[in-house]
Image (cartoon, rainbow, N blue to C red):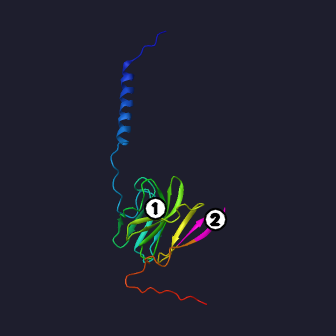
Amino acid sequence: MRVRQNPWWRATLFRAVSCGFISLLASCSFVSQAPVSPRLNSRYNDEQPSLSGNGRWLAFVSNRNGNREILVYDLREQRLINYPGLNQGNAIAESPSLSRTGRYLVYLSSLQGRPDVALYDRATQRTEILTLNYRGWVRNPQISPDGRYVVFETSRRGQWDIEVLDRGPAIEMDIPNGSPVIVPSPQP
């Protein structure tokens, strides 16, 4: 018994496959993504918030641009602020912490799976890796209100311990404009 082939189903199948392929190509085009939404809450994952001591700045982790990065939101102006050099290309950023006025921002920056504690200075728009060539893993960095001290958890001794990093008295402290710097006197 000979099965008779009907050519209409071939044409229908060809059209369906062609439409699916064209749709796939159109959805995978190299058109740049829409700009980051200027609103605080969005349809993207926004998490790990950190508020500056003066309550003006909010840093958080978001995937609005396709990868995990730190975004800074000005609560007074109600808009996202772009800081050049804050997020490095293919590094994953998480665990932000802001100083008193938000000048200093510490966070974890993971490049090729290895986390480092990074410090971003909004005044100079520079990022400094604080744990470069550090033995062990690090997590959960926090910065003091004046920006001098950075604490984080480390596995350097084979268990999770807390490490305090003193950036030194020569750094420019994060203090409100016009506030006097009070240095505590040493106790006997």
Residue positioned 46% across, 10% down in the render:
2
Q: Which mark is residue 127?
A: none
Within 10 Å of disc 2 (Cα), the crowding (few <14, some 14-19, many 20+) is some
Tag 2 or tag 1, which sits nearer the N-term?
A: 1
* Dot 2: element: loop
Q: Tell me what residue is drawn at x 44 percent, y 85 percent.
A: 181
Circle 2 is placed at which residue position?
Answer: 160
Looking at the image, residue 111 sits to the left or right of residue 35; the answer is right
Task: Count the marks.
Answer: 2
Q: Pointer 1: what residue?
A: 61
Q: Is 14 or 154 nearer to us in this picture?
A: 154
Q: Secondary structure at mark 1?
A: strand
Give, as a three-letter code, the residue at label 1.
Val
Q: CA distance from mark 1 to mark 2?
A: 24 Å
Front disc: 1 or 2: 2
Q: Is residue 52 above or below residue 87?
A: below
Magenta residues span 150-163
Amino acid under disc 2: Trp
Quadrant occupied by the C terminus: bottom right
In the image, taking residue 11 as reference, residue 96 lies left or right, namely right
156 part of magenta stretch: yes
Residue 111 part of the magenta segment: no
